[in-house]
Image (spheres, coloured by chain):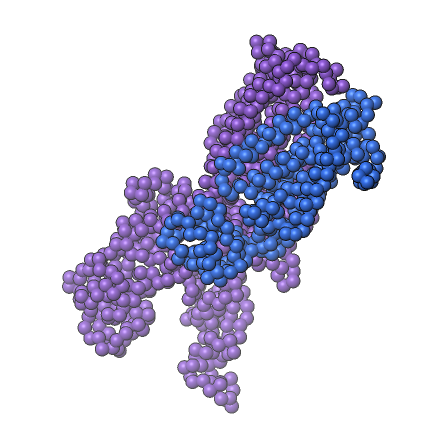
Amino acid sequence: MDIIAKRRIFLSISSVLVVISAIMLVSPSLNLGIDFTSGSTVTYQFEGGNPGTDVVTDALARSGHPEAIVQALGDDQYFIRTDDLGVYGLDAINEEVAKLQKAPAKVLDTSTVGASVAEDTVRNAITAVIVAVIFVMLYIMYAFRSVPNSYKYAFAAIVALAHDVLIVLGAFTVLGIAINAEVNAIFIVGILTVIGYSVNDTIVIFDRIRENVTLAPGREFRATVNLSINESITRSLGTSVTTMTVILAILLFGGASLRDFMIVLLAGVMVGTYSSIFVAAQILVLWERRRFLPWRRETVSTS
Amino acid sequence: MVVSAVFALAISEVNILGFVRGGDSPLGLTLGLDLEGGTHLVYRAMPEDGREPTKDDMEGLRNIIDKRVNEFGVNEASVQLLGGGVDSIPDRVLVQIPGQTGTAITLSFAADTVTPETLEAFFRNELGRPDAAVTRNENGSLMVQLDDIQGESESDEWRDAIIAQYPVALQVGYILPQTDSPAVGDGDAGKLAPDEQVTTLPSLEDVRDAFVSVGRNDVVIDTVDGAEGLFSIIMYGMDVNTTDESGRPVLGEDQRIMAALREIGTMQFASTQGTLMQWTLGGGVQEAKNLIGKTAQLEFRYRECGDILAPSDDMLWPPDGLSENEWLVGRCSNPAYFTESATEIDAADLDDAFPDISGGAIPRPIVTLVFNEDGGKAFFNVTDRVSRQDDRLAIYLDGEELVAPSARAGITGGRAIIEGGSFTTERVRTIAIQLRSGALPVGLDLIQERNVDAVLGKDSLQKSLRAGGYGLVLLVVFMIAYYKVPGVIASVALVGYTVLLLGIFKMIPVTLTLSGAAAVILSLGFAVDANVLIAERTKEELRSGRSLLAAITAGFDRAWPSIRDGNVSTIIVAVVLFWFGDRFSTSVMQGFALTLAVGVLLSMFTAFFASRLLLRLIASTWVGDKPHWFVPVRDQTPPNAPTSGGAS
């Protein structure tokens, strides 16, 4: 199967997805949780039946929190997001919520994040990812030092990585609108997991290319890459199917609190597998043909 | 070769068995707050007088908070400094208190009528808690330790059961009002005598009516023979709770009863025995927050009151047209008339501080202070001066004036009591702990808080563990069905991997959190990946016509670089995250990073040693005569001509 020949299709699909994701990130943007915006959250467990989202929202408004966002989690659980409640703010809400039913609603979980913490989290998360990416690039350059231009492998791997993260973020923006999925600290962990998976998956294919380049240095690079992809595609699919099996099982049967997180992982594994084959490897070929400036090659070939 | 393989296999199995023993209860793992439930508080140190906290300040802060939390009776609470890299100073403190619903109950009875033994027997036999262990604390209160408590409602039921179990014996004595001499005992009882016209002692009926007026018609009231106006009352289930359900202070039933009894006559004395005075669920979040966040700066200031007599003859005295009586009060209570100065009494000279009850008809919660020699001397000097000049000693806690008593003479012995209008049993206990542990070197600001109900955590953990189990089973089914013999080996290696991983987590110990669970899934994915890579490579080598054993060896060798490079990249990511994790106010990052690094290292180990050895071992038995069992389902057709230039 000559995957390289069809690269324009794959790269176009990826470009479109990345552009859509980037636009989605600017507007409407992600549904940021209190870890990023500061504020408070409370999760209630109603024990005398389900009052309904509207009733709970009204109760919150009566307690002085018209800004509250109420979200039903299922199992008669409600997730509520408000401005910073401070030390005693929860009491007022508890009072109104307690009036809704005979059986008292139980507070399962509360969380408050101050504004300064929220700023720190964003800044540190971005710094951590950038530093991690730089070190991974350096390692790839070192590990692939036996093949010519090992920096290209490092660069291609990072492009694939950025592609994966962007698309997952974009997908999560859609989820934020559709099911109110919220970006919280756990979501960052999800993105980190996607980064780990994406790099690992890309390296396995690059390893095959490295091996085939070393074994047959005279062969055309494009053919080597195509061969390598074909040789490792069973493994790529095998691994992603098995990993997705575990993720799907937890998504379907695990606790409600893990739902959003598992969706991120699922999307990440799918995109990560796709990008290793159809993005990272293709960039290598484009770059090899043009030597430098792969984007110029793109514009030339599409015009 | 085979012998060495068997040998190594045996070792690896022994290892695995050893870990199985170590980790036979996965719930014995250290669980993070998100899984176990608990409270997570982050405080930021505030610069004091424009001075940034130093490293020593922060270290001292950590130690003091650690001490406070431990005295609070919370097991396994952790106090960490956050922020700051290698060179900079940490500026935040993370306090993690597991199991917010608490594992210990502190309670005390008036007059110690209940022994730890009888209470323990009550918990074990009547309340069905064989795990209860009751001990007596230094201050006389009782501590019940339990494995777990299912939320506050369970503890409320116990409290009610205990109140119903242990009777409260009340004795009140009345005297006829005497106008010429003050009431015996505490001044309160005399002052509150409501009605000068009462000339007879209250009857039994009056006392009964007083109880009925507070909703009590089930008490047994007896007169005492030969002593008029003396009553002994036995009642069950007195509710002395001084806070309502939402934690606001209310009048306890004992207080309401006392008030009602005072209305019917002049009370000479009242004593209660057996009342449940205190019921604290260890780890109440609100109390923990109060305890940790307060600086607890205790200050003794000398208050020089306004002069009693005019400083010079030509002045109009008392000033501002006050009467003599008004002046006597105002000179020491109105800041316009007194001046304050620091004393040599230093809170650092405190040897001990403990909660106590004041004497008198209405016991009030107080804190007793014990000074060391220096402190005792300073305390005497100051109180001596206060007594001679009729001044006051003002006592402040964190800038709040608690009390400003006078003194009749210099106080020796180095003991002092502090009381305050707002003191409750809880508050007194908190203050005592704070004073004992010392004042915080810097002020704190609560910037982040998270409470997770223990039940939610447990539920979500159990569900997710079960789901992970289903996933693992599906995965094994898929691998065996598709990769056959290598699939079986990979599955065995995976199960071993999972057991080893849990064992290591228990031994290091790694705290298992939700994010840690994510890292486990990812590392599980990598472990599967390593096995898949090996199986695919072995298949290729078989195709190119090698013997089974040679194909396995070559397959491993050729899969190794990709396994190594992929995993090393992941470890790099984990190390960077761990390094940065310190700067986040959550332990989410570090938990993820540590778990991921351990998991990935282990997956490299199991794939490379365990899988390889197992595969070679199996291949050398009769199974090895059926090479097609080693080739994935899809490739059952006879091997094609080699497509790979590399498969020579």
Q: Position of residue A97 (x, y in %)?
A: 43, 56
Q: Is residue B648 above or below residue B338?
A: above
Q: Is residue B530 above or below residue B148?
A: above
Farthest bottom residue in view: B314
Chain coloured blue: which letter? A
Q: Quadrant of residue B420?
A: bottom left
Farthest left residue in view: B226
Chain coloured purple: which letter? B
Farthest front residue in view: A303
Residue placed most toward the observer, B622 or A216: A216
Q: Quadrant of residue B3?
A: top right
From where the camera sits, is residue B335 visible? yes
Residue B328 placement, left or right of B568 = left
Residue A285 placement, left or right of B464 = right
Instruction: Name the residue: 58% across, 17% down.
Output: B485
Q: Position of residue A260 (x, y in %)?
A: 56, 43
Instruction: Name the residue: 57% across, 40% down.
Output: A263
Instruction: Name the residue: 60% across, 27% down.
Output: B528
